Image (tube, helix red, strand yellow):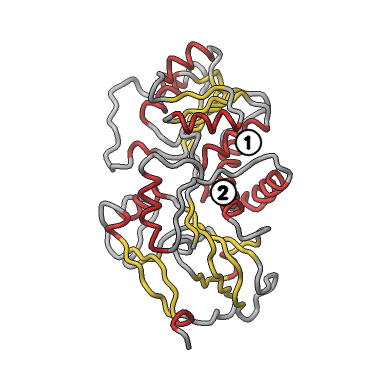
Amino acid sequence: MPEALVTSRAIQLVRFAASFREAIDIVHVPARAPMAGELQVRNRFCGINGIFDTQIARDAVDYIKLPLPSFTGVEAIGTVEAIGDGVEGFSIGDPVATTRFGGGYRELGIAPASAFVRVPAATADILTLVTTGVSALLALEHIGEVRDGETVAISAAAGGLGHLLVQLALLRGCTVIAVCGGGRKADMLRRLGAHRVVDYRSENLSAVLQAEYPAGLNVALDSVSGGIFDAFLTNMAPHGRLVVSGAAQDLDGKPEIVSAPRIAHSIYYKGVSVRGFMNGLLGDLHPAARERLFKLYADGLIEVVRDDRPFHGIDAIPDAVEWLLSGKSMGKVLVDL
């Protein structure tokens, strides 16, 4: 049998370390036929989650305690190559996606059929909608409870999650304030239709919000923390909802210690709420969200912006993680497997 059919490659966490690259090895996984209830899928693209990957590498995710070694990566899309006994609803060649931890950073996936969902096509855009798009939709509508015409602010707005949040809020007729760093990202956000783009490198976000949006923010979505979180919180409207979907600024494992009045002083008099968003806790809402996103995409109402730096093959995944962490990426970072 040719060697290509004997093994496939995957990324495995083999030690805890300061960086993803230091913590992993690329390993050869022996091929096997899918067992009863399983699918074998040839992955075409994987999505990069650099902050999560780094925290996993550092053993710093409280709700996940991994044994060593463990496979890594969360999101991948590809086509069905083999089907185990008893599996219904899938055919050879079907495009499918997975968001199963350990199923992302690998060339070939074998797992229970329940770990995969059928999708319109095995493309980078569809993978982005299945994963990051679902997060954007649920963060905005389910956790943020956005209403048509409200004022919405979004941090890291030029990133994979942020650029979809911008478009989904615009479809609701909202006034969208997009926060980013750098002129190239700002140009992209203006092209998508953001009403106000704030480059935090050259403008004071809190001052802009106070001067230009005195009625406050109805919904703010923050994945950065630090000064951006503070600016959003200070400038919320009565009954505003501040949704926290990450804390990229605290990636070094040393969260900033803030000496300031407790958050109660910022939320009580205006009835503001601060809400955490964790997509993995909302699995029952994923199917309907996916279908809505697929239709919006097919109708040309949203677009997927993919970072234009190319990454090819399993070997490029550590480079892609580091590129995302650099703050220079724009749109969704993916690897062509």
**Residue 282 bears which disc, if any?**
2
Q: What element carries label 2?
A: helix
Q: What element carries label 1?
A: helix
Q: Single out the mark in the foreground, 2 or 1.
A: 1
Q: What residue appears at the point 58 percent right and 61 percent down from the top-left corner?
A: 97
Q: Which amino acid does label 2 sit on?
A: Leu
Nearest the eye: 160 or 3: 3
Image quadrant where residue 85 sits: bottom right
Q: Residue 66, image x and y in percent?
A: 35, 61
Q: Residue 54, image x and y in percent?
A: 34, 51
- Compared with 234, 220 (above or below) is below
Q: What residue appears at the point 40 percent right and 40 percent down from the top-left corner?
A: 328
Nearest the eye: 183 or 245: 183
Q: How many labels does the image show?
A: 2
Nearest the eye: 258 or 293: 293
Nearest the eye: 195 or 224: 195
Left or right of 333? Residue 195 is right
**Residue 168 bears which disc, if any?**
1
Q: What residue appears at the point 56 percent right and 61 percent down from the top-left corner?
A: 77
Q: For the residue carrying disc 2, how many other residues have a C-alpha within 10 Å: few (<14), some (14-19), or many (20+)?
A: few
**Residue 194 bears which disc, if any?**
none
Left or right of 47? Residue 297 is right
What residue occupies the far bottom of the structure in this picture?
Answer: 1
Left or right of 241? Residue 12 is left
